[in-house]
Amino acid sequence: MIQFPKRFAVPALVGASALLLAACSSGGDTEATDSAAPTTDTEAGADLPDSLTLALVPSDDVEQITTDGEALAAALSDEIGIPVEVFVPDSYNAVVVALQTGQADIGFLGPIAMWQAHEEAGAEIVLQAVRYGSSEYVGQWFTNDPDTYCLDDVTTEADDEGINYSYCNGATGYSGPQGEDALALVPADASIAWVDATSASGYYFPATQLSGLLGIEDPITGFPNGTFAGGHPQAVQAVYDGDATIGLSYNDARGNLAEEFSDVGEQVVVFAYTENIPNDGVVLNGELSADAQQTLTDALLALAGTDEGLAALDAVYEIEGLEAANLGAFEGIVASTYANFGSE
């Protein structure tokens, strides 16, 4: 069955406007967010602030994410009994900055930024999103030149709508790594459509893969004809149009173009997968007490078990469920990936 999860790239930490962050403080000013802020004892016995700020990355239209986020915040507020405000900045970076400065309490982030928030802001990684029954996904390598990069026969599968999608080198089933032998065939002058320098599946993880397999420390200089397409569908489009021979994306971003280009799944052939990547998820401000963190974690899990909460999660990020974060994956592959290709 073809899977079309929605993904968002997560950039490295950079400075954000102090005025923007101050306007999003859960207490209305900077001092109201420090550890001395008034707290409320909930029925669960946890010390929670009088209000909380839920930070959401703008994976889509900011206005729509804000509207959907407010429904999620209202559901969470009902669950824990205190007000929850929503913070949706106009840049991804500001979410991590807000956690770092104590102006956000809960953050929904992609895997690289989750680890970054843990390392640089002291945030606690607590939950991962579930889609299609899994809390992991892969980055996919694809090409319009299967004769070169397919080491076995190309196979084709049809989705529920009758759209065909082609694969080779065992790169099907959505578990990686697969097809890595074919990566050795990629020449230094290959035209590669990366997604963005901040994308887990469209840059970080495939870059780590090339480093480990081929010893290429910097894919930008190692493949000088590579370009950043700016998004997952754009990378697919570049390969479909012939502007690049190879592209990267999450699995399976080809579905974003299938309505407009019904043959995209056949013309753009997936030939390799990265390692499995933890899904995006939830981090909590490390300044919250252990009891408060547990209360919020339990509340979010409880929300994911209700129709109202699940509808809100789905509206925001197409989340079908939440589960405890696989910290081993973050401490292993995500940490090493961030160490190799994260910001200075």
Image (cartoon, rainbow, N blue to C red):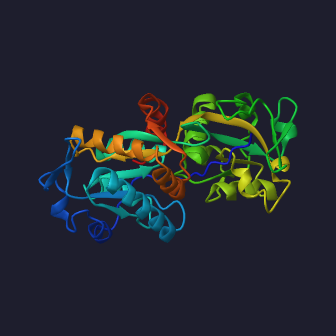
Q: Would you identify the image quadrant in which residue 293 lies?
A: top left
Task: Give percent across and percent down for residue 32.
Answer: 17, 61
User: Which residue is located at x 80 percent, y 36 percent?
Assistant: 149
Q: Would you identify the image quadrant in which residue 52 lies?
A: bottom left
Residue 179 as seen in the image, left or right of residue 74: right
Residue 71 as seen in the image, left or right of residue 25: right
Q: Is residue 173 above or below residue 314?
A: above
User: Which residue is located at x 54 percent, y 37 percent?
Assistant: 135
- Front position in the image: 66 or 7: 66
Task: Give percent across and percent down for residue 48.
Answer: 21, 49
- Front position in the image: 340 or 170: 170
User: Could one spot residue 342 in this view of the protein?
Assistant: no
Q: Would you identify the image quadrant in which residue 259 lies?
A: bottom right
- Front position in the image: 200 or 161: 161
Task: Give percent across and percent down for residue 318.
Answer: 56, 52
User: Could one spot residue 137 in this view of the protein?
Assistant: yes
Task: Give percent across and percent down for residue 130.
Answer: 53, 41
Residue 25 as seen in the image, left or right of residue 150: left
Q: How many marks?
A: 0
Q: Can you say which quadrant of the picture contains the N terminus?
A: top right
User: Which residue is located at x 68 percent, y 57 percent?
Assistant: 233
User: Which residue is located at x 48 percent, y 71 percent?
Assistant: 63
